[in-house]
Amino acid sequence: MKWAKLFLLAVVLAGSAHTVFASNPGEYNRAMQYLNERGEVCFTFYVNSPLELLQLTNVISIDNITGSEVFAYANKQEFAEFLKYNYYYEVQTPPSLVDPASIKMWDPSSRLPYEWDSYPTFSGYVTMMEKFAADYPTLCKIEQMGTSIKGRKILAAKISDNVNVEEPEPLFFHQSTIHGDEVTGYVLMLRLIDYLLSNYTKDARVKRLVDSMQIWINPDANPDGTYKAGDNTVVGSQRGNSNNVDLNRSFPSPTGTSEAQKQPETQITMDFTKKYPFVMQADYHGGFEIIVYIWGCWAKNHPDKDWWVNVCKEYADTVQDNAPSNYFQGTNGSGYQNAYAWYKVEGERMNYCAWWDHSRDVTIELSNTKVLGASNLPNHWNYNYRSFLNYMEQTLYGIRGFVTDSITGQPIKGARVFVNNRDADSSHVYAQTGGDYYRPINAGTYSLTFSANGYQPKTITGVAVQNKKATILNVKLYNPSGISNGSSSGNRPRISILPNNKGVTLSLNDAGAVKTAGIYSMDGRLVKQLPAGQKSISWDGTNNAGRKTGNGCYLVRIATATKTITESFVFSH
């Protein structure tokens, strides 16, 4: 029976207690040794019911569940709390110390070239990132997201055809190794940067991605965990940061759990995803082989579950088509799963990004072995890189377009795009700085409502979407007040509208000369462009073609160097 179904037994099982075991002193002493030397311990134990995990997920960092066996991590405080439950446990060798002989390191000072069959030293990593930007200055730049507790740079590469220009195009974010000892994704993300840059002029698919999007890649979100034993090796790496906290349990949760464990590296990621409105994201892990989708914090389905299933199935199917038969099987052989059906997680990055950033994010577990033998890294690239491209391409599909002011044509940043009878739990999206919006969604026919502060909402029905295609829907919103989106009215100048023998005189009660002026129909269409450079303008009731307009209600919009004012008026010949 699946874990998700078993959780439904909560009411029945709520009164039952778990079996209590006493751990032997040898295991306790091993645990204390690891905690004193490394600050964290990994261990396994068994549960009788998944109901028990509802409490334990807030006590320790659950890493994986196989049958009734739980693999977990804990720091000193967490382990002390876990001991109160009296489970029998077995301490495990940290993954980064299981096979140190298989770990090969690379540094440009000792070995060239880099052949993707080794892990970089920290200085080697920084050198690689800097070299990407130096070798491809028009396609790549490196941004320092922040600095770890120990002072290591947290870096992200931006890849785009006009890398120094903020264009109205969708943004995608790859982030890996938020758990410092899950390093397969670390190397694969470095290789993805190299692949996109080196193939830009050679591969039409790569060129389309780079030309159509901003792609951001942060290969190592937790360098202090990765280089726990020093900058020159990933042997001895650990899950948590230098405070021994699991960063992927330290984000604010949609369920309202405490943010007390939020760490500096967590805040760096949160600030970065707030700064850049990512349409889609991927978060890379190790220790299992599966792609999971939201939610992980509760049992309810995301409104876009059908889209998630299709996207994740494509990722897993493509991997399985290019890998050995025993790779990427997940918990049920499909290679993909809902996160909560695997196990409940609070404080997870994926939930945070979906709830607060309105972004589509997945967790991708790349290898059963957390610190993969270096010689296996090229194979795992070959298994996964096509799926990386597939998943990024989904950013270009769905419903997209621009939301603009119906009179000025200016973009309306922050306009809300809501799919009626579907959106819930923060699944709606907002227009970006350029007024551009992106709504990944499964094939179907939808009704959407567009709204923004100060504007009249607009609902558009019958919007047809096909999978793997983009439906372009540009929308103009009307602002009856003439006040810019997000501003307040205050004391603003007024337009005086007085009849004359030919039509009306439009006078601006302001010292600034008029830069632009126009007469518009009530649906926002320009009727007549009026002369500029003066305070008082006459309109004789003709349109731009010189023909008489009909009697009725019109809008006049006048702009000076510092403000724009709109008024409605009734005109008759």
Image (cartoon, rainbow, N blue to C red):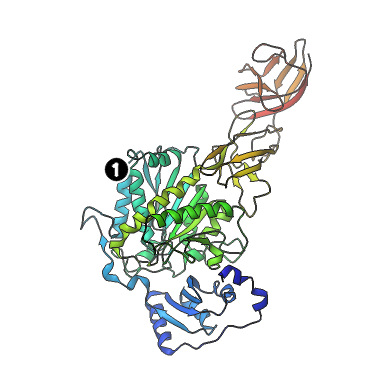
Mark 1 lies on residue:
135
Q: Is residue 435 visible?
A: no
Q: Find numbered disc 1 in the image and state the secondary structure of the residue it sits on.
A: helix
Residue 434 in the image: above or below residue 443? above
- Please provide percent x and percent y for residue 418: 64, 45
How many tags in the picture? 1
Question: Which one is in front, 436 or 384?
Answer: 384
Badge 1 crowding class, 10 Å Cα cut-off, few under 14, some 14 to 19, many 20 or more, is few
Question: Which one is in front, 207 or 152?
Answer: 207
- Please provide percent x and percent y for residue 342: 53, 67
The quadrant the N terminus occupies is: bottom right
Residue 67 in the image: above or below residue 459? below
**Which amino acid type is shown beneath numbered disc 1?**
Asp
The quadrant the C terminus occupies is: top right
Q: Is residue 567 visible?
A: yes
Question: Which one is in front, 367 or 433?
Answer: 367
- Please provide percent x and percent y for residue 177: 41, 61
Snapshot quadrant of residue 109? bottom left
Snapshot quadrant of residue 409? top right
Residue drawn 41% across the image and 37% down it: 162
Residue 210 in the image: above or below residue 371? above
Relative horizontal placement of residue 161, taking residue 348 as reference (left or right): left
- Please provide percent x and percent y for residue 58: 55, 72
Relative horizontal placement of residue 157, taking residue 518 as reference (left or right): left
Question: Which one is in front, 405 or 86?
Answer: 86
